[in-house]
Image (cartoon, grey):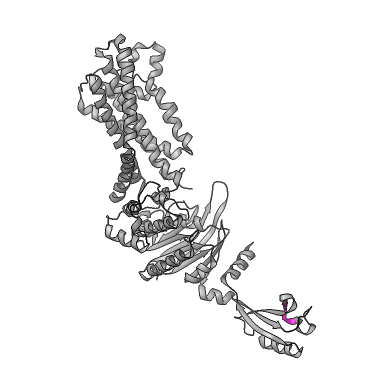
Amino acid sequence: MAPIVSIQNLTKSYASGFQALKGVNLDIEEGEILALLGPNGAGKTTMISIICGIVMPSGGRVTVAGHDVVKDFRRTREIIGLVPQELTLDAFETVFNTVAFSRGLHGKKPDPVLIERILRELSLWDKKDSMLRHLSGGMRRRVLIAKALSYEPKVLFLDEPTAGVDVALRKDMWQLVERLRASGVTIILTTHYIEEAEEIADRIGVINKGEILLVEDKAALMQKLGRKTLTVELAEPVAVVPEALARFNLRIGSEGRALIYDYETSGERTGITGLLSAIAQEGFRLKDVSTQQSTLEDIFVELVGEAK
Amino acid sequence: MNFEAIKSIYLFEMARTRRTLMQSVISPVVSTSLYFIVFGAAIGSRIQEVDGVPYGAFIAPGLIMLTLLNQCIGNGSFGIYFPKFTGTIYEILSAPISVVEIVIGYVGAAATKGLLIGTIILVTASLFVDISIAHPFLMVLFFVLTAVSFSLFGFMIGIWAKDFEQLNVIPMLVIPPLVFLGGSFYSIDMLPPFWQTVSHFNPVLYLVSGFRWSFFEIADVNPLISLGIVVVFLAACLSITAWIFKTGYKLKN
């Protein structure tokens, strides 16, 4: 199946000479949840802004459902929903009116029933007549989501949707994202929070300094780059790693009370058997043995670090 | 054509107008009344007539134009500047709407408000002086064309302006001299020849003169030339607006 969003060799240079995107290629499949991870200034928002029509590309092209986002902007923007990072809302509008306005802007006939359903789903119905300036940050975030959902988009961009949102609301938001995905909406979200990507995404893209470093299935990514550490806790502390264990590149932890061994799960041989028998031969008494899987965060830091 | 979008923008802007209607109506009505008291009653009692028209009536078309210009520029510029200022412009830019639809929505609403208040001023003026309209059709044509042109002009200022100071500089510093020196309160025949020539470079002269002709059939310049100038100004504003959107000037990086 053709990808719903296809980004080909996309570049963007600003007038200041800053190159925000350096030839990005990315295909997004229909119905998936793609998380874009990257530090501030990586180019995430620029990329989304180009797809949505807020920023003009310097080179390359983007198609959404087969239509060019510049030439066929009507066709593409009709099906794209955008929840921006900044909480930008008209201070003097009411919640209901601003959501209805978004629907109208996208050329859809008024549908108060649908808007009521969306507002109820986002726990905003009792605020429908409140002026936007009277809402809290979390509510404004939800209003922005309601606005984007009001015209029933097929592709939804969430630009750091959980920045400044409390834990309970974040959980609600992820449930909503799941429901949207179940109804066939493709979701692209950007985030700094790696747990978020880990929890919800099907695929993860890492972007830094205007370049996509990798795009992988989350599971594959975890496995491919997944490191594990084996921690052997000792009954008696040691000062240095014994000569006989040097080939394992062990680290000493917990003030000499633990030996830490890094290994890769994807490797043919993990070296665990050899290590444990070598430790036994050295006559150490073991208190405990544990392993930890590296998180996406570790992987991410490593990738971004390499790119520097 | 995305009619729902035009309707949405237009109604959004008109809702803004409704919220601020009292202040937008009261201020021009009060200032127009003051003009009539000062210029019409105090000075007019000494001038009597200009080209056979009582002075109070003579200045009415100019005063309506003054209000219309201020209102249209103010509304046109603020309507697009404010979303830029708050950031809500993202929604307009990412919606499936073309330049033409954006302009129709914003400029249509600004012109509507200008015409509404212009009409209120006309009614106010008729309370002070007898006003007859010799050519109602032409009068409405001038009225509407001016409203649309200057709303567009305001729209361009709104896009160009980087801050509130720039937003106000043209309405405050450029428009009043043009209106006051454009024959709103006198016929340019009264000026020395040099200043008569200078006045012909003032576009507002043509507006006021043509508009006044539609009331009293007296004019400083041929009303057809006036009409031509208004149309040229409108065309110029339209082309600049088209260029702005084509290049994304100050709206899109």
| Residue B128 pos. (x, y %) | 25, 20
Please give left or right for residue A170 compared with residue B142 in the image: right
Kindly tell me whether residue B226 is visible in this rendering.
Answer: yes
Please give left or right for residue B114 compared with residue A263 in the image: left
| Residue A243 pos. (x, y %) | 79, 82
| Residue A164 pos. (x, y %) | 50, 58
B31 up-or-down from A120: above or below: above
Please give left or right for residue A280 compared with residue A51 in the image: right
| Residue B136 pos. (x, y %) | 20, 27
Magenta segment boundaries in residue numbering: A247-251
A302 up-or-down from B198: above or below: below
A208 up-or-down from A134: above or below: below
Q: Is residue A239 one of those drawn in magenta?
A: no
Kindly tell me whether residue A150 is visible in this rendering.
Answer: no
Please give left or right for residue B45 compared with residue A269 in the image: left
B99 up-or-down from A214: above or below: above
